[in-house]
């Protein structure tokens, strides 16, 4: 099994690490809103390098991290030797029905090519009355990252590359889970302030799973164009701009399994 994250696994957290205390705050918020028992079995699907999962491992939870990318899981293992990790396809999980009381989808749905198939499998392994927790980070609409993502999408469209619409996919998936749940809650689990620069966006995006899969010449042309735009828009690529980022959770209590 291979994943589009394999190639850049070793540098993933260099550009995307969470501030100290944020993973622990997210875990605490999940535990509080679900009132999960200490013995509750936790599945972290799309565990990656363990940015979120390590907080659960360190707290002694009954945690299993699953990811399609073996190199990402190796990065997780380097940072957390005690973690229970498994390489598997999220649409074909090797677990029995109703095995987990708590399933985490941290920054997963927006990048899924088949969110419905993924969620059907998630619901299958979630115990009735258990919880599915969807998490994503939210940056300000006028922030550096959001503006540059929009401009890069426009540039890629002009070059014949169809735009990926992560928010649309996530919203559809959330509505599907809402219809299947007996209870749902939305909350902000953590907030932090970061200093963003256009150059950091460019460095980070070069290792993005979708972008790095494009032909090298196309990547170079797109980055050159967005760099020129950013230099004009923000004054210089290394200018810093403070931004408040939030981590949002959507928590769903699963009522019943899908009918076969």
Image (tube, rainbow, N blue to C red):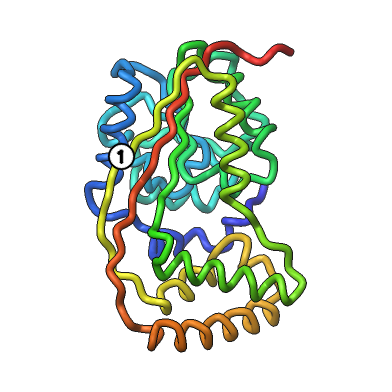
Q: Is residue 222 above or below residue 3?
A: below
For this orientation, the residue located farthest to the front is 142
Residue ID at (41%, 50%): 137
> Which quarter of the image is occupied by the C terminus?
top right
Label 1 residue SS: strand
Q: Which of 33/19 is in front?
A: 33
Quarter-wise, where is residue 133 in the image?
top left
The residue indicated by pointer 1 is: 189
Q: Is residue 10 left or right of residue 36?
A: right
Q: Which of 250/92 is in front?
A: 250
Q: Is residue 246 left or right of residue 165?
A: left
Whole-percent x, y for residue 3 in the image: 63, 51
Residue ID at (43%, 52%): 75
Q: Is residue 116 above or below residue 148?
A: above
Whole-percent x, y for residue 21 in the image: 22, 47
Q: Is residue 56 above or below residue 162?
A: above
Quarter-wise, where is residue 5 in the image?
bottom right
Q: Which of 120/233 is in front?
A: 233
Q: Mark 1, residues whose alpha carbon is within 10 Å: few (<14), some, or many (≥20)? A: many
For this orientation, the residue located farthest to the right is 160
Quarter-wise, where is residue 245 in the image?
bottom left
Residue ID at (47%, 42%): 47
Q: Is residue 181 above or below residue 79?
A: above
Whole-percent x, y for residue 184 in the image: 44, 24
Residue ID at (35%, 83%): 238
């Amino acid at each position: 099994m291979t994943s589009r994250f394999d190639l850049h696994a070793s540098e993933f957290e260099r550009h995307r690490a969470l501030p100290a205390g944020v993973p622990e705050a997210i875990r605490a918020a999940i535990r509080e809103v679900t009132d999960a028992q200490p013995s509750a079995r936790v599945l972290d699907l799309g565990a990656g390098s363990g940015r979120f999962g390590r907080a659960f491992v360190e707290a002694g939870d009954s945690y299993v991290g699953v990811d399609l990318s073996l190199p990402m899981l190796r990065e997780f293992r380097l940072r957390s030797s005690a973690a229970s990790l498994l390489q598997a396809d999220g649409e074909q999980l090797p677990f029995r029905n109703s095995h987990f009381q708590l399933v985490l989808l941290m920054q997963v749905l927006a990048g899924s090519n088949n969110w419905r198939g993924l969620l059907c499998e998630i619901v299958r392994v979630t115990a009735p009355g258990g919880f599915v927790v969807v998490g994503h980070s939210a940056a300000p609409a006028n922030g550096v990252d959001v503006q540059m993502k929009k401009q890069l999408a426009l540039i890629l469209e002009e070059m014949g590359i169809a735009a990926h619409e992560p928010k649309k996919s996530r919203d559809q998936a959330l509505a599907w889970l809402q219809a299947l749940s007996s209870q749902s809650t939305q909350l902000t689990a953590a907030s932090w302030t970061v200093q963003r620069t256009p150059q950091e966006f460019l460095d980070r995006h070069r290792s993005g799973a979708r972008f790095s899969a494009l032909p090298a010449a196309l990547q170079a042309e797109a980055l050159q164009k967005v760099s020129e735009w950013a230099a004009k828009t923000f004054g210089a690529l290394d200018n810093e701009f403070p931004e408040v980022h939030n981590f949002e959770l959507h928590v769903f209590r699963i009522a019943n399994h899908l009918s076969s």
